Amino acid sequence: FAPGELAAVRALRRALSTRDGHGALQMLLDRVRRTPDNAAFLRQVRPTVPDA
């Protein structure tokens, strides 16, 4: 990962860890389905995740 992507992934993992497993997975899948690829997903998520 590029440094910005790595920061987003780490922040996303921290945010997901506060949810129950099923809820976290559903939220992640819903968001991923709305983007054409992983890079676009991370760009979309970065501004919404604290410390990203």
Image: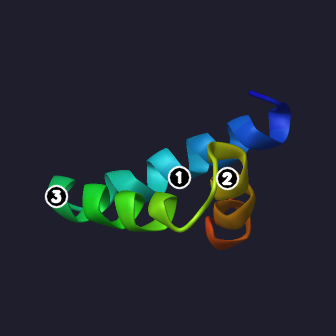
In three-dimensional space, the C-alpha distance between marks 1 and 3, rounded to whole angstroms, equals 15 Å
Circle 2 is placed at which residue position?
42
User: Is residue 21 found left or right of 47 in the rendered image?
Assistant: left
The residue shown at (47%, 50%) is 14
- The three-letter code of the residue at mark 3 reads His
Location of residue 30 (image quadrant): bottom left
User: Is residue 21 found left or right of 18 in the rendered image?
Assistant: left
Question: Horizontal and vertical percent for residue 24?
Answer: 29, 59
Which element is circle 1 on? helix
Q: Quadrant of the N terminus?
A: top right
Compared with 30, 17 (above or below) is: above
Circle 3 is placed at which residue position?
22
Q: Earlier in the sequence, mark 2 or mark 3?
A: 3
Q: Is residue 43 visible?
A: yes
The residue shown at (61%, 65%) is 49
- The three-letter code of the residue at mark 2 reads Leu
The residue shown at (48%, 66%) is 31
- The three-letter code of the residue at mark 1 reads Leu
Which element is circle 2 on? helix
* Front in this rendered view, residue 38 or 46: 38
User: Is residue 36 found left or right of 1 in the rendered image?
Assistant: left
In this view, the residue farthest toward the front is 36
Q: Residues within 10 Å of mark 2 (few under 14, many from 20)?
A: many
In this view, the residue farthest toward the bottom is 48
* Front in this rendered view, residue 29 or 7: 29
Q: Quadrant of the C terminus?
A: bottom right
Question: Horizontal and vertical percent for residue 43?
Answer: 75, 58
Q: Residues within 10 Å of mark 3 (few under 14, many from 20)?
A: few
Which element is circle 3 on? helix
Circle 1 is placed at which residue position?
12
- Residue contact at pointers 1 and 2, CB within 8 angstroms: yes
